[in-house]
């Protein structure tokens, strides 16, 4: 018997989301049924609703989630009913060319549940293969990562996407280490997590750059040692001033704009690293003198989901949180109910929140 539960659906391009009764199958082989407890509102959900990802409407939105395993399908032996899990969109396959080379965080063949959830007889496309603005959802077993159940769901769920992207941009992709100087462009949820990740990794100087003074105030709470309002001053000059004229070891772009990517590029020291974690749109272009790319040496990288390996990173980060060494509570600007997702999109667009989190 399939389960009938409430879920947030984007039915047509650009139209407001609605709450509908959806059909969630019982878990088949390799699948798990999740009793969702919390799910953060992320930019990607809005991008789906706007048709900016693909045209596979209707979408079941939500992907930054935590909950309890309700039932496991055949062959699932590392999860059991009652386990507290964070959902992820990187269920690694173990045998693609990247996994075989020992780089599962780049897995090129991640997978989702085989069976489809449905609405009104139509197959739903779950956001990032998850679909967790719903009372229950169906995922592949590898998409559910067991963590310490003492963490509150609304906080734990954030590790499933945006916060992981930012933490990982600093710790995994940027390889920030003890004594480094770092600049983070954009202090939303992702940028603030990159600031925290830099602090955790032992960075000495952490410079937050934003055009919104409120965001800069918040950035200090996550560990920024310096803040720059780039609507008032040239951030490249200001960063050089703070770093004895040299620039930073690691510059992290957490917005996804050509202008801030260029600022990041020019604000790094010789042999420094630029990490792009902000998501650009397909029309954006940058122009850089090749001699600067060559002459400065170093590395230009992009960070996809913070280059995370959920099984390695999620339990570790939750433990750090429970030990009081990782600030996660501050990311939760508000908790809301399922029927407030549309309003939360508007708050996100207006820049009023780091994260609105749906509680179920
Ligand atoms: N210069 C500096 N800061 C800027 C600029 C700019 N030109 N434009 C916007 N910002 C700041 C905003 O003021 C805001 O604080 O960037 C921040 C972006 O934060 P959010 O909109 O909250 O986005 P966030 O959830 O952090 O995601 C950032 O990462 O995963 C991607 O899709 C996501 O591209 C997005 C990015
Ligand atoms: Zn793989
Ligand atoms: Zn997301």
Image (cartoon, rainbow, N blue to C red):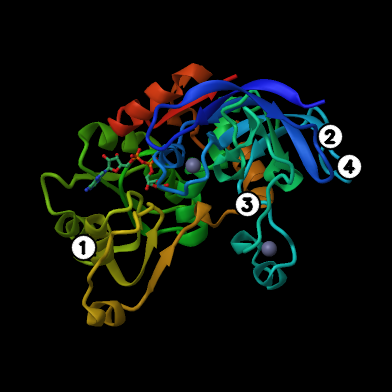
Few, some or many C-alpha atoms within 10 Å of disc 1 (few <14, some 14-19, many ≥20)? few
Tag in front: 4 or 3? 4
Residue 194, position in %: x, y?
A: 42, 48
Q: Horizontal placement of 222 versus 165: left or right?
A: left
Residue at label 4? 74
Contact flag, marks 4 and 2 (Cβ < 8 Å): no
Residue 170, position in %: x, y?
A: 45, 54
Residue at label 1? 244
Residue at label 3? 90
**Which one is earlier in the sequence, the residue at label 1 or at label 4?**
4
Examine the image and state in which quarter residue 155 appears: top right
**Which one is earlier in the sequence, the residue at label 1 or at label 3?**
3
Under circle 1, the secondary element is loop
Tag in front: 1 or 4? 4
**Which one is earlier in the sequence, the residue at label 4 or at label 3?**
4
Tag in front: 4 or 2? 4
Q: How far apart are marks 1 and 4 (CA)?
A: 60 Å
Examine the image and state in which quarter residue 110 appears: bottom right
């Amino acid at each position: 018997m399939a389960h009938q539960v409430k879920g947030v659906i984007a039915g047509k391009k650009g139209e407001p989301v609605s709450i509908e009764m959806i059909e969630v199958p019982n878990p088949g082989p390799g699948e798990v049924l999740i009793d969702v407890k919390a799910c953060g509102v992320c930019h990607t959900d809005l991008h789906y609703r706007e048709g900016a990802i693909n045209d596979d409407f209707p979408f079941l939105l939500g992907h930054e989630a935590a909950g309890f395993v309700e039932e496991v399908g055949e062959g699932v032996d590392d999860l059991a009913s009652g386990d507290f899990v964070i959902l992820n969109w990187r269920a690694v396959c173990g045998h693609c060319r990247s996994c075989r080379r020992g780089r599962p965080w780049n897995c090129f063949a991640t997978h989702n549940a085989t069976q489809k959830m449905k609405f009104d007889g139509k197959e739903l496309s779950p956001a990032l293969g998850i679909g967790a603005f719903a009372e229950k959802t169906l995922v592949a077993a590898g998409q559910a990562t067991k963590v310490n159940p003492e963490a509150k769901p609304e906080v734990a769920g954030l590790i499933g996407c945006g916060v992981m992207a930012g933490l990982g941009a600093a710790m995994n992709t940027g390889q920030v280490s003890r004594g480094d100087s770092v600049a983070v462009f954009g202090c939303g949820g992702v940028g603030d997590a990159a600031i925290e990740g830099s602090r955790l990794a032992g960075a000495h100087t952490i410079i937050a750059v934003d055009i919104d003074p409120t965001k800069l105030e918040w950035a200090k709470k996550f560990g920024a040692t310096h803040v720059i309002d780039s609507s008032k001053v040239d951030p490249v000059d200001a960063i050089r001033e703070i770093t004895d004229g040299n620039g930073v070891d690691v510059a992290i772009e957490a917005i996804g704009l050509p202008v801030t990517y260029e600022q990041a590029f020019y604000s790094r020291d010789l042999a420094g690293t630029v990490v792009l974690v902000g998501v650009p749109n397909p029309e954006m272009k940058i122009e850089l003198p090749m001699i600067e790319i060559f002459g400065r040496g170093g590395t230009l990288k992009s960070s996809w989901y913070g280059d995370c390996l959920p099984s390695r990173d999620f339990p570790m980060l939750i433990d750090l949180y429970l030990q009081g060494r990782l600030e996660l509570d501050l990311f939760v600007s508000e908790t809301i109910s399922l029927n407030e997702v549309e309003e939360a999109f508007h708050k996100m667009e207006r820049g009023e929140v780091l994260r609105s989190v749906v509680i179920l």
